[in-house]
Amino acid sequence: MRLGIDISSYLECLEAGASYTVFRRRVDPVSYLHDVNGCDIMRLRLWVNPYDEEGRPYGGGSSDMDSFLRLAKVGMDKGYKILLDFHFSDFWCDPGKQFLPKSWKPKSLQELIEILQNYVESSLKTVHEEGIELEAIQIGNEITNGMLWPYGKLSGEEGSPRQGYDSFIPLLKQGIVSAKKIYPEAKIVIHLERSYDKDVYGEFFDEVTKAKLPFDIIGLSYYPYWHHGFDEFFSNVDFVRTRYGKTVWIVETSYGFTYETAYKDSIPFKPLVDKTLFEKGDASEPYPLTQQGQASFLSTLLKKAKSHHVDAIIYWEPLWLPLPGLSWASKEGEEYIHETEKPTTNEWANQCLFDYDGDGTLGLFAFRKRK
């Protein structure tokens, strides 16, 4: 079983002065995770234009083409295979938001298909011309409810026959066809969340299979706070692997090492996942959010994933430290995704594999390839 990392925010971390240590000795974390932990996949997201009309960045790593190319070259130089994660938006995509890029103004589904074709092919031509070898290409990010809304939106109760596949499937197909045109050997990943729910996955991938879309990997997000316990999750893994005969990757996972808020230069970095979230009943807590809890979660996940024939696990943003200037979204980014009520700091720092001072957590030693 392979291991990987999504470090799409890493360049911004370095620009903010991030420093990483293991037992207080300075390390290059990207090299360390490859050479010591055995990670060999680097997943990198790509947004279309993560800046407002005045050029102000949306934050979250400013994952534009320049950032992707720079990070992909870092990864290749250090021995990683690259997974490109197309979001098909200017900023974050997940089941609750799949906004059209600002510059995409289609008047019909067919126009949008043509825009998507041109974007994927031109983007991948640029990537290819820069000498980037892609092992895999992800067509959309957490597309449980479709993508490129409103055209490709799936509506209705999840797990029951939903409306919208007649528009969504042609968009997904065009993304795949365009990607294979430029990178014919790259594996195609289709990525959902709600990873405990067999009904959702059965409905979705039955439709994809019926449409005879060529793809190689079913990618799942697994955050146990929201995606239930190991039993339900791996029951779904077994279900999709057996029913569809595809390779299964966990393309996003993480676990927290503390409940505490970080303070840097008197700026509070309050975690998204903390005791408040659990007290509200909005999430579950299979292990305490401590360094030992993080390590226990990862040790168990790796062991169970191997026994259930998961081919890869990718840790999401293990290097995203709480530093001034780093945020999951700027005010401009929040406005784009209509989430202006949230703080504009890094809410994910307690999920890192390095603590708030940049020293490796116990989870860093657990997320390691074993023979």
Image: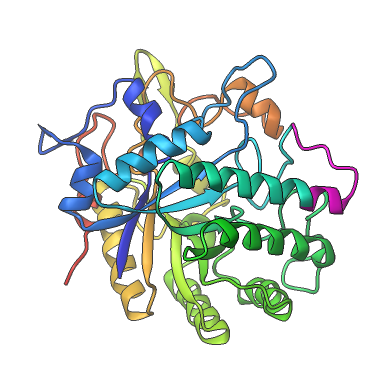
Along the line of sight, the residue nearer the viewer: 145 or 256: 145
Decide if residue 158 is in sight here.
yes
- In the image, residue 366 sits, relative to residue 266, either above or below, namely below
112 part of magenta stretch: yes
Looking at the image, which is closer to me, 220 or 135?
Answer: 135
On screen, residue 192 versus residue 99, left or right, reads: left
> Where is the N terminus found, in terms of image quarters?
bottom left
Q: Is residue 131 above or below residue 3?
A: above
Identify the magenta region.
103-113
- Vertical relation: 328 (above or below) 267: below
Quadrant housing the C terminus? bottom left
Q: Position of residue 13 (x, y in %)?
A: 36, 28
| Residue 259 visible in the picture | no
Residue at 66% of width from left, 14% of height from top?
Answer: 54
Which residue occupies the extreme bottom position in the image? 242
Q: Residue sitting at 29 percent across and 31 percent down?
A: 356
Residue 39 part of the magenta-drawn span: no
Q: Is 344 positioned to the left or the right of 157 in the image? A: left
Q: Nearer the viewer, residue 110 or 267?
A: 110
